[in-house]
Image (tube, helix red, strand yellow):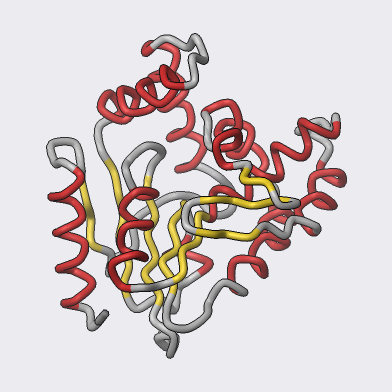
Amino acid sequence: MNINQIPIIAIDGTTASGKGTIAYKLSQYFGFNYLNSGALYRLVAYEAMTQGVELDDQAGLIEIAKNIKPIFKDRQVIINGDDVWPIIGTQTYGNPASIVSRIPEVRVAIFDCQRDMIQAPGLVAEGRDMCTNVFTDAKVKMYFDASAEVRAQRRFKDEQEIKSGKTYEQILEEVIMRDERDKNKPVGRLYPTDDALIVDSTDMNRDEVLTACIEWCVKQGITK
């Protein structure tokens, strides 16, 4: 496998495993561009739900995916000048995004948008199939995970901040169901590649995870 001349750090992982936060911090540390690939599928779900397009309307979803053109700035996801990440980043759009991402034609439409993000000096991309499909030519690959209980607790804190009213038990069930969908999708299923660093953050704090990831990147030849 040829490694892309522009260095790419690709991170896959389960929901609420911390990959988004660490990916962004790595992009800051190395001065790279940042791609939250899951935001693209969340945007498709958001636009569909806003426009009244049903999630089983594949033709409608594909058309939406073809026209998704967000601007990524820091952790913002900007559409028509507005940062929609505070809205689409919630579990409300996480589950529909998982459903949308099962459609092969939607993934094809999103693929080109993702590859267009490969720009100097480098890219940190996080999602479900960054290592296995979209950025197989990445210089560094990582796979994030943690126990379902710990991940549900993390998500529960986020939901409390926006006062969604969801209980921990509801979120735990959603996390388990999301794992099942992501790991058994007919296309773009979630699994670690043989050359990826496996990061289990169950008993690690954010700084410990970040330090381990920086060390792995440097070991693979990534420099500031």
Q: Position of residue 82 (x, y in %)?
A: 68, 46
Residue drawn at 55 percent across, 44 percent down:
185
The C terminus: image quadrant: bottom left
Q: Residue at x 42, y 78 (%)?
A: 122
Q: Is residue 8 above or below residue 88?
A: below
Q: Is residue 167 left or right of residue 209?
A: right
Which residue is pictured at 54% across the width and 49% down the height? 38
Q: Nearer the viewer, residue 134 or 167?
A: 167
| Relative horizontal placement of residue 146, taking residue 139 as reference (left or right) | left
Quarter of image, res 171 = top left
Residue beneath the point at 72% across and 53% down: 106
Number of disc labels: 0
As displayed, is residue 18 above or below residue 94?
A: below
Residue 186 percent coordinates (x, y): 59, 48
**Percent from the top left, x then y, of residue 61?**
79, 45
Q: Nearer the viewer, residue 20 or 180?
A: 20
